[in-house]
Amino acid sequence: MKSEKIYWLLFLLYFAISSCKKEDQFLNATPKSGLSLISNLNDLQLLLQADQTLNIQYAGLGELSTDDFYVISSVFNSRPAYMQNVYIWAKNPYPGQVNSDWNSDYHAIYVVNRVLDGLQELGTQGDQTKYNSIKGTALFFRATRYYDLLQNFAKAYQSQSASNDMGVPLRLSSDINDVVPRSSVQVCYSQIISDLQTAIDLLPNTVQAKTLPTKACAYGFLSRTYLSMSDYDNSLKYATLSINANSTLTDYNTLIPTAFALTNLSQFPLSECLYISTMNNYNLDGITRAIVDSTLYASYQDNDLRKSDLFVLYTGHQRYIGSYDFLTSNQYNGVANDEVYLNRAECNARKGNTSAAMNDLNTLLVKRYKTGTYVNRTASGPQDALSQILLERRKELCFRGTRWTDLRRLNLDPSTQTTLTRNINGAVYTLPPNDLRYVLLIPDQEIQLTGIPQNPR
Amino acid sequence: MQLNALCKNRPVLITDEPGKLLLTHIRGLKISRQTLLCMKITAFLLLIFCMQVSATTLAQNVSLSEHNASLEKVINDIKQQTGYSFFYNQEWLSQAQPVDIDVRNQPLEAALKTCFNNQPFTYAIVNQTIVLKLKENSDNTPIQPQKPVTITGRVTDTVGTPLIGATIAIKKTGKAVITDDKGEFSIIANSGDVVACSYIGYNSYEFTLNDNAPPFVTIMLHPRTNGLKEVVVNNGYQKMSLQTTTGSFATVDNQLFNRETGANVLNRLEGIVPGLLFNKNVPASAGIDISIRGTSTLFSNTQPLIVVDNFPYDGDIQNINPNDVENVTILKDAAASAIWGARSGNGVIVITTKKGKRNQPLSIEFNANVTVGDKPNLFYSPNFIDSKDFISVEKSLFDAGYYDSQLSDPKHPVVSPVVQILANQRAGTISSSQGNSEINSFENLDVRNDLTKYFLRKSIDQQYNLNFRGGSVRDDYFYSFGYDGHLDNQVGNDNNRITVNGNNNFYPFKNLVINTQIVYTRTKADNNGQLGNLSEGQNYSYNPYPYAQLADKNGNALAIPKDFNPAWVTNPTAQAGLLDWQFRPLDELQNADNTGTASDFQLKTGIGYSFFKGFKAEIKYSFENSEANNGNYFSQQTYYTRNLINEYTDFTASNAQGTQYPIPLGGIYNSSNSSVISNHLRGQLSYDNNWNSKHQLSALAGAEIADTKGGYSANATAYGYDKTSENYTTVDFANSYLEQPYGFGNRIPDAQEYYYTDNRFISYFGTLQYSYFNRYGITGSLRIDKSNLFGVNANQKAVPLNTAGIFWEPSSEGFYKIDWLPLLKIRISHGNSGNVNTSASALTTITTLSGSRYFNLPFAQITFPGNPDLKWEKDAVTNLGIDFGVKNNLITGSFDYYFRKATDLYGTSSLPPSTGNATIYGNVAATKGHGFELVLNFSMIRSSNFSWTSNFLLSESIDEVTKWNAQSGAGTYLLGDASAGSIAPSVGKPVFAIYSYKSAGLTHETGDPQGYLNGQLSTNYGEIISHDNSVDSLKLWGSARPTTYGSFRNTFTYKAFSFSANVIYKLNYYFRKSMLGYNSLFTDWEMNNQFAKRWMQPGDELKTSVPSMPSLTNLDGNRDAFYSFSETSVDKGDHIRLQDLTLSYNIKSPKLFQHAFKSINIYCVASNIAILWRANHDHLDPDLYTQSSFLSGYPTPRTISFGFRGNL
């Protein structure tokens, strides 16, 4: 009897101990398919290939506020209140609401910060080239997102006041518990520039898909950044480096236009496109809502292919169909060589290099006019060159997300100021140059949870 | 429907028989092996069954070998071996003598004789029950001469009240009568007979009849203080006497369970279980939604754990044949359910299936019924506007130029026939009078007539079940075969189910029992109903327009607009080179070919060994494999296929393949397969004993390991599919094509998908119950769960969940003198149960996917940022219970009061969006709740021919969010509650809460709805909505789920007839009505019959709350949004419903079939009969999910069943 008892106890004990050992092993199984931890460089590379996260949903609020387009009252009235408010530059356009521009920019920043943290944890794993390209790509994405945030939620860069003007919170790690205050505009731009310069050293010259950045593309974006800072020397420098690396321009005469897109899919992506990214759609939803500003449309000559290829007449109005992303209905705001040429032309004009400036302009425009009809432009002097170039910039880059930045920058100079006007439901709204409303409000959720200061009104 | 969601299948090129297709794919050989296995098993079962039939014709024999054993042990052995039950008073056993016995395979009678030789008892065998009786001290019952006497008398309780329905039985002959409504009886007996008088809840009284018995006897019965009648509850680990438990249990016995005839086990529980609520106003996709005592979680699984025969059931509940169910136990509070640990927070439903009994002859039971259900009533829905009104709206919109952009849109969007006629009139292509007469002819049409005629029918359910049970000395068995056929009330949908269940227990030698059970279910379904596919598809995504015609006078299919403008689709020039692009719903019904099969195989086995005194060691194992296959074939005749081919047509063949048809001509086939495989293994050691009939102790400890793997795979869509040859064409899924007639680049749709889940648990558990004289008792339990659910590096912080409880039965105390309340028991328990959530992880996890948006690259996304502090959800419940019985058992019942605190609930909490995550998922929320359940059983009349019993259930469950810090705007709370199925938490508010904007009536001049802005009446809707966007600015109405609910059931029996009616009530809650929105009427054809009551001229605001129709230039989306959520959108949901009526005729030993049947039962059940009372003023059924289409959201159709149950 007794021995039987002991036998049972031993059996139970054995059962308990042996099960403890194997327990951990048993419970380490992955509970769902597709779930894994970040364990190697390839995982990080895959995270950077998520174009749904990283290449789309750049801020669209700025573009929504520009004079590229207008809407009629019935369309306006059918849109959600916050869109209406942004469109008419209301002081407090989205009270208490989540703002997808702010959130999507910061979400992309979180992902690339996680990649950068992952690089630190994993090291090169014996593949320096891959490590470099991942790091360069991540830094490039981060720079473009901070640039995007600054164009919408901070004042335009002015060297005198940049150190005191409020920028945005600069998060450089993926730790969600970090408490980060708003950095100054100066510090933010410095971070963007340093990220891009590091990226330039690390990025490859060619990539498998234009959703990933190349060296040329980083040069181009740095040129864009310096231009937004009115730093024409540096913008010129990096535009030149970009063009030296890749000078391709697409001849619009070769486009195969379809009814509602710039060209057909066989030409996607356009050869002059360096990098694909798109903005949040607001009112710019395809051809049914936004109507092209009539003055803008009238400014194209009849032999200008852009007049026919970028626009279509629909229900009595001209609509924009020129997005370089003709795969989806999103508006393109990536880096393309036309912009880089225009950057260099403008910088040269501002520096007094009239012929170099006009040379770049003509190089671009000859690809935009019907073959054999373009007559090279000339300029009487740098000022004439500049005004021609600014006009062509307006025409070439409309609906590309650059207009809002250009308005903010050009308004700093009294000679190039613009007052915007909206006419809707019988009321007239205006946005004078350098108005406080050129800086959009940071969403309430961010202000309430972090206590960072809101932009003044 | 379940199948539809699960399955699709890819063709196999070379196969000559269709069946093979399903077998050879994905799971490949595995399935075919299993099918084979199942066939073998079925054959095996049949074989065993045949053997059993002969085995059980033997007499009941027993084998016993005991020396100096307690009588109780011997009784238990006999019970086990024979399946006979014993009837005695526990206290008598203290006087029992030890037993010496050694019999081998002897008849039961002989064994009993030996056992009771020197005992102070005698025994009698009555219908497989062995009734013990204390021997009279003095006389040895001298043999009296036999002489028939008629005894008459009355049975009363101790205060002299007559007991109606008491049984007077002559022991020797078994002859018995029942006291009448004066408590009186009359029976003929012989002198010397022992006469027994018994009554439920009272101690029996026996006397021996002698010659000088008085002509009239008065028998006074004493209330029973401790039980002879034992209610057994099963918590899935052990069976316990309800008397010694402290938790809150509800039991549904076989008779109650079979009141309803439905094919789904869970549906039969509606309205008969206290504290259990069926939430009907949830989306159909949610399936059956049950809550036990309200909601204890926010965003984790809210459904109770379902346990079938000791193990959690991982398959589809539809697979369980209700005819195999013996009884159901519902574990409501933590003390009852916590043995199930981290999965028990929502309560547990324990289903026990039928078993055989040892030493019982073969018994065959047959049950057949047919249920006919009404056609769904499409005319119920408020989401409709009659054709005349609808056409008038279209006319005014046309005049205002509303359709001009659609008519000229290069996408050729749909316009309705009326709009097209108006456009043609304007263009002069038809004359004004011709157009007008065509439009006039539409005005009397109602699409609901065509839909009812061609798409709906009466549902017919057939149910057949045959089972065999019995047992011999060494085993018992139960076999059952069931067939259920269902013709759905939507034409095209039907399914059938076959179930086979074999349950054997073997007792090869003393103290050892081996259990085996095999259950196999196979379901086939056709899912070809088209009601959900009738909407236009693009702009007007809700409904067909009200004057749509689906068939001409001869019943030929007519086309209605879908996706594109009919004028464009029927224009030969525009359509050159394209397939017919018209949509004819009636043809779709003919051509649909969407089928599914599902199977479920369960194997359960166990071995138990008893040793020492009261110990038992058991190992139990359960294996389950559920498979579901679905194949959806779209021939080229279907709109689906024609539309896809057309959309992708590339006239210039400019694609890489240089083909005009990137989607080839021919059919399209989607197929999928899903499976669940689960393994559970449990080892447990239990101890069960009592001493001196005073102390009773039972303890249990064990460990369990469980692994449930789920898999789903959908095959790549097969294009150009030929159903007979099963050939298909490979297409290019990688590149984008421009869609016709206008579009951006799109890849060819591909259904291919694969995922799996793997949930693993290791658990340790223990329980303890001790009671003293069944008068006082304590209970306790402890459980530790570990799982792999928290991420790849499992966070194994196991939280022990414990419970404790006590009970006291004052009515068993010597000093207890309350005569009118002979039973009183008080229970108190407290415990913790938990809830599992699989959607969070402690570490950053990524998901790797293929096919990035632009260049089709593989990519990865961060699934979960990682939260190292994750814990189980915890639910602490305290329960206070009272069980009582009023004199004569006139009223018995219970009252349970509980309060609960649920903490560490999963939810999202707001983060600064600059962290990159606007919310984080974690243990951020808490709720509290309280409530009660009152059960009252009235035994109104109990006479020999007639009885009337009433069962009254009243439950209250009230909950409140106590912790929640995520920020949401007012819109979240308004939209969140609309379905009553989603939760928008706010501290201090009910978990499911209904809000509205604060609003006043319409304006006098314009009929605009009015809200409040800064305390003033306002019609500035944009400002009203956005000015104060907090939840506090809204009016809180209350809970969207009933907080008071229950049922009232009355059962009458008269001779062989039994009639029962169940009334269900749900009180104290609110629901949101579907509301008229002008914007959505114009842009989506989303209709509402409020339109007819709209404000039309000043003064109407006194009669109506429906706003005026706005002009197009004044169309403000915010006005609709405000009105949809204004105070008029909310109404009280309270209602009382006559749920069912049942009538049955029950004959024991029927004369007509006396050779065929032991008993037959003929029954008729009518269900979903009517709402008897409702608080709302619009005659709405609040138990419906608020819909925006009239195609869905009809009341559950009334059904009536006729059935027959026979016992051979």
Image: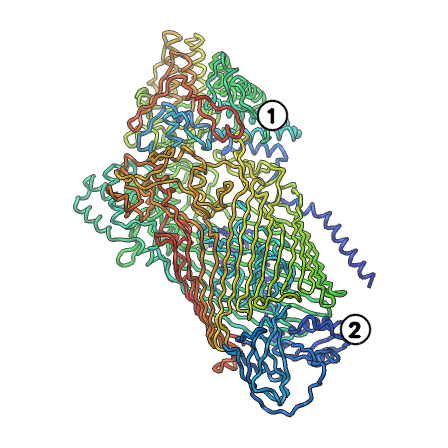
Which residue occupies the foreground of this view, B151 or B296? Answer: B151
Q: CA distance from mark 1 to mark 2?
A: 86 Å
Chain letter behind tag 1:
A
What secondary structure is marked by label 2?
A: strand
Residue B1187 on image: x %, y %: 39, 49
Mark 2 sits on what residue?
A: B68
- Are the residues flagged by discs 1 and 2 from a single subunit? no
Label 2, residues with CA under 10 Å away: few <14, some 14-19, many ≥20: few
Residue type, numbered disc 1: Asn
Residue closer to the observer: A343 or B548: B548
The image quadrant where one finds the C terminus of chain B is bottom right
Q: Is residue A420 left or right of residue B929?
A: left
Which type of secondary structure does the marked residue at label 1 adopt?
Answer: helix
Q: Residue at x 67, y 69 (%)?
A: B506
Name the residue at 45% across, 29% down: A278
Q: Nearer the viewer, residue A192 or A438?
A: A438
Task: Give the percent coordinates (x, y) of residue B403.
Answer: 28, 38
Indicate whether A71 appears above or below B1205: above
> Would residue A4 be found to the left or right of residue B461 on screen?
right
Q: Nearer the viewer, mark 1 or mark 2?
A: 2
Q: Nearer the viewer, residue A87 or B711?
A: A87
Q: Which residue is mark 1?
A: A132
- Image: B834 above or below B149: above
* Kind of residue at disc 2: Asn
Q: Is A413 drawn above or below residue B88 in the view shown?
A: above
Rendering coords of residue A12 (x, y %): 76, 55
Q: Is residue B399 left or right of residue A3?
A: left
At label 1, counting other C-alpha atoms closer than 10 Å, the crowd grade (few under 14, some 14-19, many 20 or more) is some
Q: Are marks 1 and 2 in contact (CB under 8 Å)?
A: no
Question: What kind of colouring is applied to the model shown?
Answer: rainbow
